[in-house]
Image: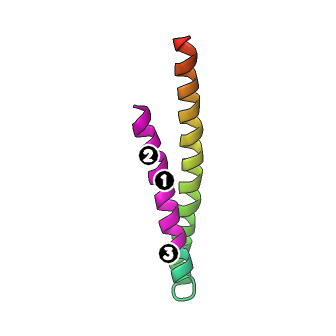
Amino acid sequence: MIKILKYTEYLYLAVAFFSLYRIFTDWNTNREGTYLFIFFALVSIGMFLFRRNYRKKFEQRKQDNQQ
């Protein structure tokens, strides 16, 4: 279960990096289309941080219950 949570964190990070790439490559040609990728990048980074924090709390709770 914990490995799945760790992989989903990095999936959000990959989406954020892809969105940032699209922002930088399309900014001069299609500025209105890049606003959607800005939104995706911000949400993905936020979800990465949220999921990482949640996973660490879950691991700590599991470790506390074992002791």
Q: Quadrant of residue 65?
A: top right
Crowd class of label 3 (few under 14; some 14 to 19; many from 20; radius 10 Å) = some
Residue 30 vertical position relative to residue 61 in the rendered view, above or below: below
- The answer for how far apart the CA atoms under marks 1 and 2 are is 6 Å
Please report contact status of discs 3 and 2: CB closer than 8 Å, yes or no: no
Front-lying residue, 35 or 59? 59
Please report contact status of discs 3 and 1: CB closer than 8 Å, yes or no: no
Residue 4: x and y in percent read: 40, 39
Numbered range of the magenta stretch: 1-22
- Magenta stretch, main secondary structure class: helix
Residue 36: x and y in percent read: 52, 69
Q: Residue at x 57, y 68 (%)?
A: 38
Front-lying residue, 28 or 4? 4
Dot 2: what SS? helix
Dot 3: what SS? helix
Q: Could you say which disc has been placed on residue 12 in the image?
A: 1
Residue 18: x and y in percent read: 47, 67
Front-lying residue, 11 or 26? 11
Disc on the earlier residue, 3 or 1:
1
Q: Is residue 18 magenta?
A: yes
* Pointer 2 residue: 8
Q: In the displayed image of the protein, which residue is found farthest to the bottom?
A: 29
* Pointer 3 residue: 22
Q: Could you say which disc has been placed on residue 60 in the image?
A: none
Dot 1: what SS? helix
- The answer for how far apart the CA atoms under marks 3 and 1 are is 15 Å
Q: Residue at x 57, y 88 (%)?
A: 28
- Say what amino acid the circle numbered 3 marks: Arg
